[in-house]
Image (cartoon, grey):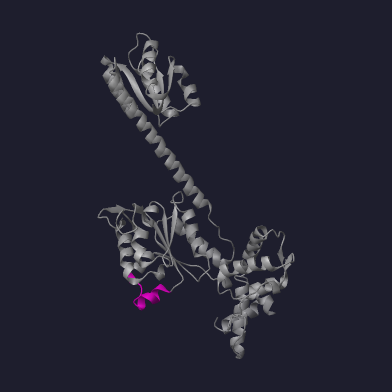
């Protein structure tokens, strides 16, 4: 017995009996209705693969309008359910109109059992296929939503960060290519996620690729995919990152680490907006929004012959430089507090605080590893400390030789410059606070900045 559930709707009870006897031997569930007004409540309770629907119900009325009406009601409630119309031989034109309205097929009275069974099987198979497609689409939608909901948000309110985020908001609305640069640990990936989140492609996937982690031999397979048998381990067809990111955003991290001889292949895919899987001759069009990131000096790599100039132009329509943590002033403490709550909860040490001396230590430190280093420093302090209040000694920071916080010259003017620069960086955009820390008036600070040509 084949899988399939069928609802038969006909006011002629002899027709219902005949169809029930024929189909119940072939399919697992058969329900019959003689009154079409019961259809809505029946469909609310159960889902059918197929509805066999008569075209006319009122005695002496052969317009087929009733059948068309109930066809529309069924498709509205259950769009994936197949509907096969039952009609008399002389009403073929009515049945054709039903097909245009959304019916899957029609059968003629009197019917041929073999032909009717073939029609029913085909209609049920179509309905089940539609259901599977709808289910896959829903799963894909749920997966994309889940992946996008795992996004981390950018924390901070310093003028330097706000300038970056203002640019992000402008750029996100377009499909232009973006190059994000900055030191390691500054949060370039978070900026890419924010661009995607604010873009018109936000309902599709952001697909990230670490270009520095892909081996040269697998570069084409990872980015462009492959077909079965293309190489030894290619046991099935596999889509590459370009295809997976279709209609979404492709984020190529560490783009500066891509070997020179592979850059032309990436450039060709970006220019042509199509890829060819390894082992195939068929090109596949792709619609992606490209975001790249690197901590390397790409113009210098171009000068040294290590990066293609035309590829740089292609990926660098808009350039966003992410500021290092040491230049973000009070954001250091805001981030420290965020990580303190995060790891306090993780290691069951609630209500932790950082005292003033420890805060000063965090503010004075140069943070060569940026936000990533700060996060690790906070986590380590939370794990090792036995106190509710973290002190300066709880933070094990690397000594940085020649850092801006330690004068490395005895020249009075240079030392004065360095002190002023440190105060300005600690209080970005707040001249009054910087002047107060230096123990001078706001006007005196302005005069010194002008005199020292800063």
Give the number of callouts: 0
Indicate left or right for 169 with 382 as reference: left
Residue 192 included in the magenta stretch of the image = no
Q: Is residue 203 above or below residue 451?
A: above
Q: Which residues are magenta?
A: 297-309
Furthest residue in direction left, as rendered: 281
Q: Is residue 1 above or below residue 225?
A: above
At x 71%, y 62%, the residue is 352
Residue 231 lies in quadrant: bottom left
Q: Can residue 337 be seen in the rendering of this structure?
A: yes
At x 53%, y 68%, the residue is 186
Residue 338 lies in quadrant: bottom right
Return the residue nearer the eye: 351 or 178. Answer: 351
Residue 302 included in the magenta stretch of the image = yes
At x 63%, y 79%, the residue is 445
Q: Can residue 440 be seen in the rendering of this structure?
A: no
Residue 93 lies in quadrant: top left
Q: Is residue 16 above or below residue 153?
A: above
Return the residue nearer the eye: 22 or 436. Answer: 22
Q: Position of residue 431 (x, y in %)?
A: 63, 73
At x 64%, y 76%, the residue is 364
Q: Quadrant of the N terminus?
A: top left
Q: Quadrant of the C terminus?
A: bottom right
Furthest residue in direction top, as rendered: 60
Q: Position of residue 322 (x, y in %)?
A: 50, 68
Indicate left or right for 15 with 424 as reference: left
């Amino acid at each position: 017995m084949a899988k399939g559930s069928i609802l038969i709707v006909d006011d002629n009870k002899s027709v219902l009996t005949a169809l029930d006897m024929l189909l119940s031997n072939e399919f697992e569930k058969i329900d019959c209705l003689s009154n079409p007004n019961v259809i809505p409540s029946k469909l609310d309770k159960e889902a059918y693969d197929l509805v066999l629907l008569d075209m006319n119900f009122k005695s002496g009325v052969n317009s087929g309008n009733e059948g068309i009406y109930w066809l529309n009601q069924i498709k509205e409630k259950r769009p994936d359910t197949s509907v096969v119309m039952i009609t008399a031989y002389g009403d073929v034109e009515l049945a054709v109109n039903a097909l245009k309205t959304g019916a899957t097929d029609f059968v003629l009275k009197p019917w041929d059992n073999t032909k009717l069974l073939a029609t029913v099987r085909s209609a049920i198979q179509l309905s089940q296929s539609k259901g599977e497609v709808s289910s896959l689409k829903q799963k894909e939608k749920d997966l994309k939503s889940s992946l996008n909901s795992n996004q981390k948000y950018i924390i901070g309110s310093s003028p330097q960060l706000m300038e970056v985020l203002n640019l992000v908001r402008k750029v996100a609305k377009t499909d232009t290519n973006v190059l994000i640069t900055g030191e390691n640990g500054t949060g370039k990936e978070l900026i890419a996620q924010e661009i995607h989140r604010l873009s018109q492609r936000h309902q599709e996937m952001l697909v990230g690729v670490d270009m520095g982690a892909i081996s040269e031999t697998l570069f084409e397979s990872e980015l462009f995919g492959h077909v079965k048998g293309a190489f030894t381990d290619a046991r099935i067809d596999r889509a590459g990152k370009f295809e997976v990111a279709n209609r979404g955003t492709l984020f190529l991290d560490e783009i500066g680490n891509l070997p020179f001889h592979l850059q032309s292949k990436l450039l060709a895919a970006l220019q042509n907006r199509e890829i060819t899987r390894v082992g195939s001759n068929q090109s596949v069009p792709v619609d992606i929004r490209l975001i790249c990131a690197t901590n390397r000096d790409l113009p210098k790599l171009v000068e040294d012959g290590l990066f293609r100039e035309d590829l740089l132009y292609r990926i660098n329509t808009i350039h966003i430089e992410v500021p290092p943590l040491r230049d973000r002033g009070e954001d250091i403490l805001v981030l420290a507090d965020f990580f303190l709550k995060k790891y306090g909860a993780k290691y069951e040490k609630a209500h932790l605080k950082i005292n003033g001396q420890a805060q000063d230590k965090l503010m004075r430190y140069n943070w060569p590893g940026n936000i990533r280093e700060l996060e690790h420093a906070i986590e380590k302090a939370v794990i090792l400390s036995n106190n509710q209040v973290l002190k300066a000694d709880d933070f094990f920071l690397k000594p940085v030789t020649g850092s801006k916080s330690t004068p490395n010259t005895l020249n009075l003017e240079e030392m004065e410059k360095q002190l002023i620069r440190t105060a300005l960086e600690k209080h970005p955009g707040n001249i009054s606070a910087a002047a107060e820390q230096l123990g001078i008036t706001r006007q005196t600070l302005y005069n010194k900045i002008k005199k020292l040509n800063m």
